[in-house]
Image (cartoon, rainbow, N blue to C red):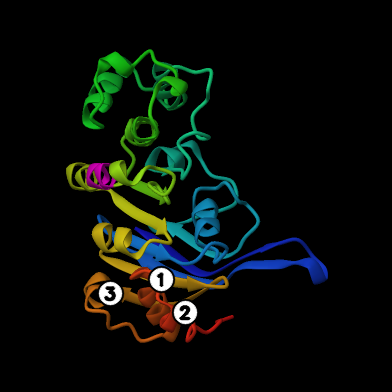
Amino acid sequence: MIDARDLSITFGMGASAVHAVQKVSFSVKQGESYGIVGESGSGKSTILRALAGLNKDWSGELRVKDVILSRKRSIDFYRGLQMVFQDPYGSLHPRHTVNDILNEPLIIHKFSDRERRINQVLKEVGLGSDYRFRFPHQLSGGQRQRISIARAIIISPSILLLDEPTSALDVSVQAEILNLLQGMRAAHNLTYILVSHNLSVVAHMCDRLAIMNAGKIVEELDVEHLRQKTPEHPYTKQLLQASTGYDRSIADTLEWFD
């Protein structure tokens, strides 16, 4: 469904250039949920932005549904691939109602059954028609993220790119959003790429994952190996140790990988 080969992304030029992604390769099967894990600045969100066409300055090869992607994407591409962003406070227009937000992609992609789709998708994300004419400031963080998810799936894409979809939310609602995304994937046979720094989120959501550090994939493994705590690369082992909580004896043994 998705293939990246030797994907590289650099910001800036000369001595000040930042090599955010360095010759990254991975594949995602249809219907699979694939995780990309790493610390802040490791390059994981930059990969999603290149796939989504938001970052056009990349080299290598990207394929979606066996079609090689160029820098310029067609409207059909965006009908098949959508993205849910990290910040539900920043990704929704503050002066648009929920109805406006959900109508916009339907108008762009020329759907005629807009009324039915809006009512249906609000029900799917656990919100009723009562929310249709509210503004984002009248919603909680979890409700805003539900609207972001609804906006992404309302045009029936086959791929969702999820950029830390729960990290800006209260712990009490994170599990609800993750379970909603799990249900959406099963109901619509969606393919996911989930970016996160949280190994427990990835273990809950994904089949396989890639571990990134300093712009490179250092290890790829399935979730079962993650749960059994049997990774091979020392950086992955350190991430697992860190995910269990702060321990001074462990912290003193951590190494810097670059």
Residue 116 picture location, percent across and down: 25, 18
Question: Which mark is nearer the camera, 3 or 2?
Answer: 2
Extreme residue toward the front, this view: 248
Question: What residue is pinned by disc 3?
Answer: 226
36 sits left or right of 230 in the view: right
> Which residue is at a point 28% across and 74% down the rendered structure image?
226
The kind of residue on which mark 3 rests is Leu
Mark 2 or mark 3, which is nearer the start of the sequence? 3
Residue 65 visible, this angle: no
Give the alpha-carbon distance from disc 2 to disc 1, as whole Å.
7 Å
Q: Secondary structure at mark 1?
A: loop
- Residue 251: give its label: 2
Residue 136, given in percent of the width and then of the height, sits at 45, 23
Q: Is 217 left or right of 174, judged from the image as shown?
A: right
Q: Is residue 96 left or right of residue 148?
A: right
Magenta range: 175-181
Question: How many other residues sit within 10 Å of disc 3, few (<14), some (14-19) or many (≥20)?
Answer: some
Residue at the spot 34% in from the left edge and 58% down from the top edge: 1
Contact between labelled residues 1 and 2, with CB atoms less than 8 Å apart: yes
> Are dots 3 and 2 in contact, CB under 8 Å?
no
